[in-house]
Amino acid sequence: MSSIIKSDYLVIGSGIAGLSFALKIADHGSVIILSKGSASESNTSYAQGGIASVTMDSDNIQKHIDDTLIAGAGLCHQDAVKSALSEAPERIKDLVKWGVKFTKTDDGDFDLAKEGGHSEHRILHAADMTGAEIQRALLEKAKTHPNIAIYENHLAIDLITEHHVLGNLQSAFNICFGAYVLCEIDNCVIPFQANYTVIATGGASKVFLHSTNPEIATGDGVAMAYRAWVRIANMEFVQFHPTSLYNPGKRSFLISEALRGFGGQLINGDNERFMPKYDERAELAPRDIVARGIDAEMKKRREDCVFLDMRHLNAEEVKSRFPNIYKYCKESINIDISKDPIPVVPAAHYFCGGIMTSLNGQTSMQNLFSIGEAAHTGLHGANRLASNSLMEGLAFSHNAAMKVINKRPRNFGSVIIPHWDESGIVDVKEWVLVRHNLKEIQNIMWDYVGIVRSKKQLNRARRRVHVIYQEIEDYYKKSKISGDLVELRNLAAIAFLIITSGLRRNESRGLHYMTDYPDKSDKFLKDTII
Ligand code: FAD
Ligand code: SIN
């Protein structure tokens, strides 16, 4: 039986949100960061385009706020938008202080890119590997801080709440004491106890068959919070990135929006540029519009993909601005992006919804915070503006750290946390069931809950996911815990949350497009809260 591991702060997740929170708080107490794989494997590491912030006199914060509100289609929380974007220039200074090296012009200014929905060039980037550079710098910094301990291959299973410790805590209600964590090295479950627990587990796009995300994006934090009765918001708003590389059967790879910002044009199989037909902003319209335009074009022409065309641009500049994408396309499908059209399709990319938080990352449960993609802060509304996500992670982790630095934890006396109960559990190892159920959920979500939805499709998806959900719960109760099983159970919960939220919104707004309700309705000018 593994003994309890204690810290002042338990941070679940080692992406931009978790690491930046840890760096801000570490001088004030002991911090444990959990990462379910290696600490460098996160969505953050794969971010390409960059991070949005006003840094030039020719731009201003109000314009960034306005662009964000337009993309968010009426559902952004004005206070969250104002808080994050006004502070963004300060947060960029934090990154630079921690050692992040952004690409600069010959004059020493930040080299600023433009992406869909932005009225100005304001995206700071490190070539086309911005996320990898941020992850590198923050992780290096965290590893050298004496108060930070990083536990790799430690997967949080469930939050520890007063339900687990009720025997000795009659007066407590709605409180988080830490998390039960599976150590995948020794295959044992360890209780991690903390004064404050922070969910920074990232997104959940792996619930869809085609996604730009790495394998870690299984929505664990949101699912854990949901099981603990924490409030979740706006799960219907899933962002599909318009351009992931079309390379059937291979791991997905993003073709950054920055290529369109650089002048790339979308063409169909007959070499016709089609986006101007769908929106006057053409390739640089907000993502929901471009993704739907591509989807409509592919369906109409019965084609498996469309193409991103960079051939009219300066070839040397294309190669030097996008070295990683150039190399990947050359090696994986043997095309030269400066000479050949790039085959692309939309893929699930980002969750605008998540665990509901205040501007300080506080959730509806005491001592539990959430930051980054796992959280719903209200910044993105019904559709995220490109490159606002890395900034969201930074901005709200700063706010959360400032909140807890000045907060003395409530004293519950001696809390006794029970060990993980494995009585009645057998090692049945039904891997086929796990694999099969995973594929089934991903297919259902892609086919019925994708870019374009209908009531009929959502109801069909709900019926099917419900059966799978029950099967998984049944199996979970009887079986020895494993990482795959925990993730599958979480993905089923995420699927349920997306479908349920989608069925409550009888309108089309931002990323949620319903064929039977094609217009916005003021009746739904509110968050969907579960
Ligand atoms: P992540 O970076 O995903 O980190 C999550 C962490 O949680 C990981 O360390 C993981 O191991 C850990 N974790 C998860 N579950 C558990 C568990 N159960 N137990 C323990 N640990 C767990 N956004 C932008 O703003 N600009 C971009 O250019 C951009 N490009 C992108 C490109 C790609 C290909 C992708 C996939 C996303 C991109 N995004 C971009 C979105 C952005 O990268 C993410 O939203 C953001 O990095 C999320 O950061 P995070 O810290 O919340 O989570
Ligand atoms: C991209 O580079 O296209 C991704 C940017 C983002 O998701 O914000």
Image: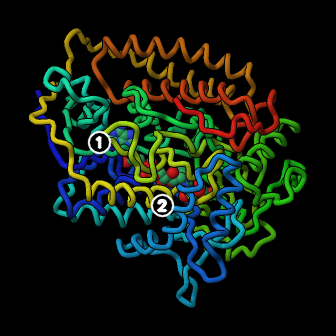
- Residue 238 position, x and y percent, is 61, 40
Q: Which numbered dot is residue 13? A: none
Q: Is residue 393 left or right of residue 505?
A: left
Question: Label 1 is placed on what type of residue?
Answer: Asn
Helix, strand or loop status at disc 2: helix
Q: Does the rendering let one see residue 329?
A: no
- Ligand 2 found in image quarter: bottom right
Image location of residue 158, percent across then percent down? 32, 30
149 w.r.t. 348: above or below? below
The residue labelled by disc 2 is 131
**Cβ at disc 2 under 8 Å from ligand 1:** yes
The disc placed on residue 367 is: 1
Residue 122 rendering spot, x and y as whole percentages: 62, 72
Where is 48 relative to 239, above or below? Answer: below
Residue 286's image quarter? bottom right
Considering only order in the chain, which callout, 1 or 2, is on the residue closer to the N terminus?
Answer: 2
| Residue 58 to residue 177: above or below | below
